[in-house]
Amino acid sequence: MDRLQAMQTFRAVVEAGSFAGGARKLGLSNAMVSKQVARLERQLGVRLLTRTTRRLQLTAEGERYLHGASRLLDELYELEAGLGEQRGELRGRLRLSAPLDFGVGELIPALQAFEHRHPEIQLDVMLEDRCVDLVAEDFDLAIRIGELDDSSLIARRLLSMPVGVYAAPAYLAEYGEPTHPDQLSGHRCLHYSLQREGPNWVFEVDGRLRRYPVRPVLTCNNGRALVEAAARGMGLVYKPAFLGEPDVAQGRLTRVLEGFAVPALGVVLLCADCGLVPARLSALIASLVTHFHREAPWPARS
């Protein structure tokens, strides 16, 4: 039995959480995957997995073997990818982190052209709104929106994202339309719980930025859900235009307080300062910059 293949099979089973999942990932039959893992255990003379009716669990020996096997497989993969890049071929894995809503609506379309041009590059995309640790969690690139913490990471600005305040026509008919940000305290507001400023919405008034506190009737950690709540008449929402404008076009939302500028959110690419950047990562960064330069989502209104 090919030991490298057995390592790959074992890791796939653990990552998938089942033999059936590992088989689907590798394109093999369940029986073949089960047989390879059993042979590996016999060759090593230890049990790597405890099998129950509900799940698989690593033994202490299995955890140790998985750690070592994964390190060897990753090093081999990177070695082969590096040699390919020296020949001018872009190949290997790139792991990306991006906010959920931006990732679904804007990043995936941007990755389509890149994947088409570089089919030998495997893109591993994690969409969630927390700020990942690029180095500790082995990410090649992260997309962040808004203010950044000071760090040793290399940042490159991707685009500026306009922000607006939106409400459903039915809400405005019932509660009236605010004409100044200081009226927000009397309105039903829908607030993004991960916003750094807390329950404060920022506007430019009389030439300077001011924060206006709101009292949310609904707080949520997902922007798309908040926009949907606003479209259903639950209140006002303060969100990026790429989330709000599609519902404006459909007549589900109306943009309000347009006479008061809202600071745009910066969208930034981040990568670790680890010396030489692989050619595949440089190519991805260049592709994203080009895409969003041409097709910035929902440019600010004049």
Image (cartoon, rainbow, N blue to C red):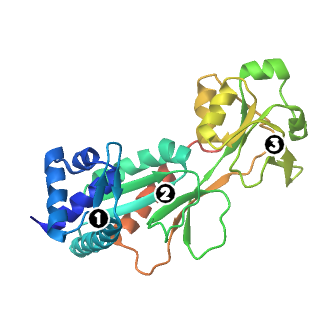
User: From the viewer's perspective, is residue 177 above or below residue 131?
Assistant: above
Residue at the spot 77% in from the left edge and 37% down from the top edge: 258
Q: Nearer the viewer, mark 3 or mark 1?
A: 1
| Residue under label 3 | 260
Q: Is residue 301 visible?
A: no
Residue at 13 percent across and 50 percent down: it is 32
Disc 2 marks which residue? 97
Tag 1, which secondary structure? Answer: strand
Q: Residue at x 28, y 56 (%)?
A: 12
- Alpha carbon separation for disc pair 3 and 2: 33 Å
Question: Which residue of the protein is positioned furthest toward the bottom in this rendering?
Answer: 275
* Badge 2 amino acid: Ser
Q: Residue 173: horizontal and vertical position, in percent? A: 80, 18
Whether residue 231 is visible here, answered yes or no, is yes
**Dot 2, crowdedness within 10 Å: few (<14), some or many (≥20)?**
many
Q: Quadrant of residue 118?
A: bottom left
What secondary structure is found at the residue carrying circle 3?
loop
Q: Which mark is residue 173?
A: none
Q: As shown in the figure, which amino acid type bears the numbered disc 1?
A: Gly
Q: Is residue 207 left or right of residue 139?
A: right
Viewer-nearest residue: 248 or 29: 29
Q: Is residue 32 above or below residue 59?
A: above
Q: Position of residue 219 (x, y in %)?
A: 72, 39
The disc, 1 or 2, on the residue closer to the chain's N-terminal end is: 1
